[in-house]
Image (cartoon, rainbow, N blue to C red):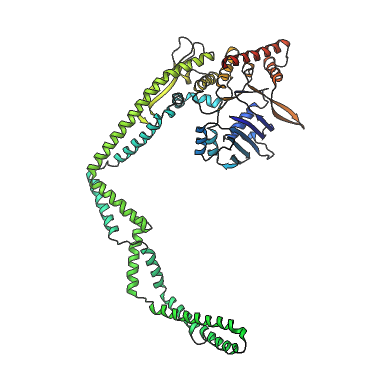
Amino acid sequence: MLLNLHVKNLALIDEADVNLGDGLNILTGETGAGKSILIDAVNMALGAKTARGLLRENGEPASVELLFQVSGEGKDEALEALGITPEEDGSVLVARRMSHGKSICRINDETVTVSKLRAATALLIDIHGQHEHQSLLHKAKHLEILDAYARLKEQGLKGQLSESYRAYGKAQKELSSYEMGEEERIREMDFLSYEIGELSGAGLKDGEIEELELRHRQMVNGGRIMESLARAMEYAGGEAGAGDFLSRAVRELSGAAHYDDGLSELLFQAEEAEGLVNDLGRALSDYASELEFDDRELAALESRLDFLHGLQVKYGKTYEEMAQALESRREKLERLQAFDRRKEEAQEIYERAREEAYRLATELSRVRKEEALKLTASIREALVDLNFLDVQFSVDFSELSHISENGLDEIEFLISTNPGEPLKPLSKVASGGELSRIMLAIKAVLADSDEIETLIFDEIDAGISGRTAQSVSEKLNDIGKSHQVICITHLPQIAAMADCHYKIEKTVKSGRTVTEVTRLKAGEEIEELCRLLGGAAITEAVEKNAREMKELAKNRKQQKRR
């Protein structure tokens, strides 16, 4: 659940710190007080794009922090899969800091990408605003809802189908590779035989190209090498060379050492240096005597290198790549030589994979149709609770022309909100306000199977009042028994049902308008209900009505607990 929301420097909010509770959390306030800014703040923390108008022109960065308490082994495992480990107390801190053109996202003080932030928070919180309500107009969402209700993920049936579908696709691709005529196959075999002969007949050796290139560089620069060796030998061992001068130094030091024992170490060093220079001179002479630069060898070497470089262009730059190219061509040739047998095997594998995929898809469809009957009844009951008194609700199934990873089903929710009217798709019947109530009904039905602990409802009260508003408040309270619910509203019927009530209001500080959020105490809740009920004029009757609404809400909560 969401324990704390901290917002700083976002639009009219200088700084707001909201500690949220279990059950139904209600936020109310005057129109324009900044209720929508809080939703924008949460969306920002979840990785959504932020409207530029929310960021301040003075360059102050905006920041939002969400502190969650994570419970459940499954949730921990899902976060671990994303590389996120909750703290020892089970908390996860999500933070996002934004200024114009810059965004920094953190989870538990570790910087993460926006995509990782979205993936992680999708496991923890779900916001239902106008956009989410509108998603009900898309049929793909209907299948997602049905599968969630049927707990198909937990049953493993969808996972089995997904795996089978991938095997089916792989078998289909393999079979399609055998779709060639006899003439094309013969041409391909001839070409592969030529390439195999060229590679296998090349006598390739690991490291040969590098060795030949080194020898070629040596031969091409042979004259320069011999000239440098001759000079080096002269400087090291010739007359007036280093060896000659070191020999003289040794003789001089040897004579002087008879009279001064302190020169013994220097004499030793001079003798060592003389020996090293003499060794160098002999080594240079030996190396020069072994060097051979034959024009015929150079021509043969260049011919071999040209051939190998040609193979590199065609088959790969390294010995390993060329060896792999030879092996792959041998496999292709063997495959084409056994074309008919291999094609029959591929056909058999394809048929088995197709049969299994369709079997699982058919079984999935059967389960969906059984669960759809239960879902239909549950949603209709929830809709009646939300004041759709004569509503009819149905799930329409149609079969796709081809199998997909989700099976063969395409479904669509149909509804009739008035007696005598035929069932029609939601997109042709429901208004914006009705869509919000339909989504609420669905969420109420899915409450037991929905693993996301925190649900935020925005604009849930659009276009409703009276008895319908009371029904919506009761349904929100029902969901609040198994989830943490956060709801922004302007209706007293919904506000009265709050387990925790927060007021959002504008104030003027230091000549500047700011938005503040305050958790209300019992008496303050009554005052806020009076404002929602009576506007500017709060009479005794309005206050009595507010107290009565709060008492009725309290009684209903107690009845539900029993």
Is 310 left, or right, of 75 in this rendering? Answer: left
Q: For residue 552, say whether it is visible.
A: yes
Q: Quadrant of the N terminus?
A: top right
Q: Quadrant of the C terminus?
A: top right
- Give the image location of residue 283, x and y in percent: 44, 79
Residue 411 drawn at (x, y percent): 41, 23
Task: Evaluate whether residue 471 shows in this view.
Answer: no
The one of 14 and 426 positioned closer to us in this rendering: 14
Residue in the image at 33% along x and 72% along y: 297
Left or right: residue 3 compared with residue 381: right
Residue at 50 percent across and 79 percent down: it is 276
Up-down relation of residue 276 to residue 66 (above or below): below
Q: Residue 155: percent from the left, percent from the top?
A: 41, 28
Q: Residue, x 51% and y 11% (percent of image)?
A: 389
Q: Nearer the viewer, residue 390 or 307?
A: 390
Q: Position of residue 391 (x, y in %)?
A: 48, 13
On the image, which quarter does residue 292 sit in? Answer: bottom left
